[in-house]
Each structure stands twice: as C-alpha cells, then as structure tokens.
Image (cartoon, rainbow, N blue to C red):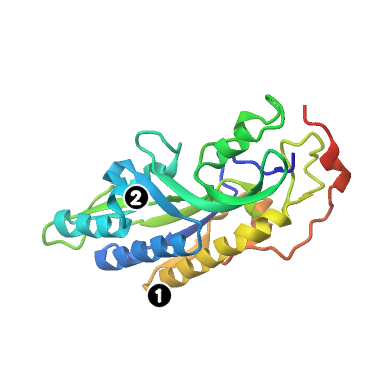
Amino acid sequence: MRNLWIQTERAFATWVADLSALRTRPESLLEFAQHLLSAGIQHHVLEFIEAPLIHYQRERDGDLYALLTTLYHQHRIVDLFGFTGAAMMPGQPRSSTASAILAWYDAKDRLVERPCTDLGALIAGLEPSPDSIPPGFMKHYPPLRVTGKRLEYGSASLEPQNPPNAQSLEVRLAIHSDIWFPWIYGSAHPACDYERMFDNRELAGRHTPRLNAFLRTVAAKTKAIGGSWSVDPDDTGADAIRWLNEDGIFLDVEPLMRMPPEALDIEWI
C-alpha cells in the first residue's frame, strides 16, 4: 500500500481571505466569489457538485455563480461560501459536495488521477487490512474545504443586517490531508516514527502545482479588491507551516530524515 497520506479533523493548512473591509460592497464580494469559483474549476481543485443549503445541484442548475447573483438581486443576500454547510461530511443533508482532481495509488498500487469528493472515504476504501488505519485519519472532508458567511442586506442598506460579528468577514480555505505535501510522516504506516518522512512527491507533483496556482490567483484577487490574504498559523499544523507560505506548498524541499524505501514493504497490521 503506497497511499501513506491521511485526512484529519484538524486542518494541515488554512489560507484566509479577509474581506472585512468590503462588507459594505456586496458587488465586490460577489466578484470575489465568481473569481474563486472560476479559478477552482480552471485549476481542477474545487468544483461544487451540490449545495443543499441553497438548493443547488450542478447537473440541474449549471453555473453556481449565476445562482449566487440571483440570490443577491432578488433577496439582497450575498452567500459568501456560507452555503458550504462548513463543507463537512459529503452527502449529509446540510453539507455541500465539492470535487477536485487528485492523484493517488489504486488497490494495485497503480498511479491514477481522478476526481475526488471525499478523501476520507477514498483512503478508507484503500485500507490495506481491516482496522489498519485509525478512524481519525479518515475524516470525511472534501480535498479543499471552503467556508464563509451569508450576509443579508436591507432593501436600501449596504451594511449587512446579519450575521452577528459581521464586522469580521473571512473566506477560509483549508486542506485536511497531507496528500498535498511532497514529504509526509505516513502516520498510519507501521514504521511511522514522526522523524523520518516518506516520499510523496509523485502524488504531490501532480496536484499540488494546481492548488498553488489556485491559491495565488485567489490571493491576487483578494488584494486587488482591497482585502488581505494570509496563512492562519493557529489553524495550520506546527510541522506543516514550515512547508508552505501565502503562495502555497513548497515542492522543492528536502526533509531532515528520509524513510528508507524498503519500509514500503512492511506489512500493515
């Protein structure tokens, strides 16, 4: 089994678009949403399949941004990724489903590259033997988790009427898996010692450049319309934060200690 990555409750890394200064500029917020949605599709890291909180289904409704603009023009609501339902538990009643194209190894250890909506379900389906991967390493989240707020404007007001604490307005983009990183500890692997790192460059080299390109374009848009962009150190792993910055994840890096290749032959129990 060559899939040594995991998916956890705690984020490995979180990038934040702080749009608080734009809360009285709903058109700018919609412009940001359009850019993020388009960039996600363009770079194959974020495409919404459904969002029950706004009754969206891609096959039926097509362009998600068109639905968001209709929501604003008809009801004076800017749903700035509040509709994701915290992007949790794909398939659950209040949760969105979002897809990204990722690389992984199939059950025969062949490299594949396909759309994925739930990395936790994916790794569970590839588990080498029953109970060999702890449940905490198979959290049901999409590859890229996006969360935000829903703002309601009065009929003639440009000041949001809700939610509470609307002075703070952030869109947060989080990854909960180390599948994006070139070197990983292999936390579920029998040889894991949290010192030596397994080589994950074959997978990361395929999908992480697209994630980085997506993050850079969203960062540029955030700054262009008057917001700020940063990594949230409190919602980024202490080890992971050394491997990334505001532009994305570093790929041309080396770990302090490498796990020997023969460790891959150890039997999972």
Identify the residue under disc 1: 224
Q: Residues within 10 Å of mark 2 (few under 14, many from 20)?
A: few
Q: In the rendered view, does 168 fall on the left or right side of 162?
A: right
User: Can I make out residue 182 in this image?
Assistant: no
On the image, the x and y values in percent for residue 242 come to 68, 58
Q: Residue at x 77, y 43 (%)?
A: 194
For the N terminus, the quadrant is top right
Q: In the rendered view, does 118 fall on the left or right side of 52?
A: right
Is residue 224 or residue 233 the one in the foreground? Answer: 224
Q: Residue at x 35, y 61 (%)?
A: 33
Q: Earlier in the sequence, mark 1 or mark 2?
A: 2
Q: Residues within 10 Å of mark 1 (few under 14, many from 20)?
A: few
Reply above or below: 9 against 143: above
Label 1 – label 2 distance at C-alpha: 29 Å
For the C terminus, the quadrant is top right
Circle number at residue 58: 2
Q: Residue at x 31, y 64 (%)?
A: 29
Callout 1 amino acid: Ala
Q: Could you say which quadrant of the image residue 9 lies in? A: top right
On the image, the x and y values in percent for residue 255 come to 79, 56
Callout 2 amino acid: Arg
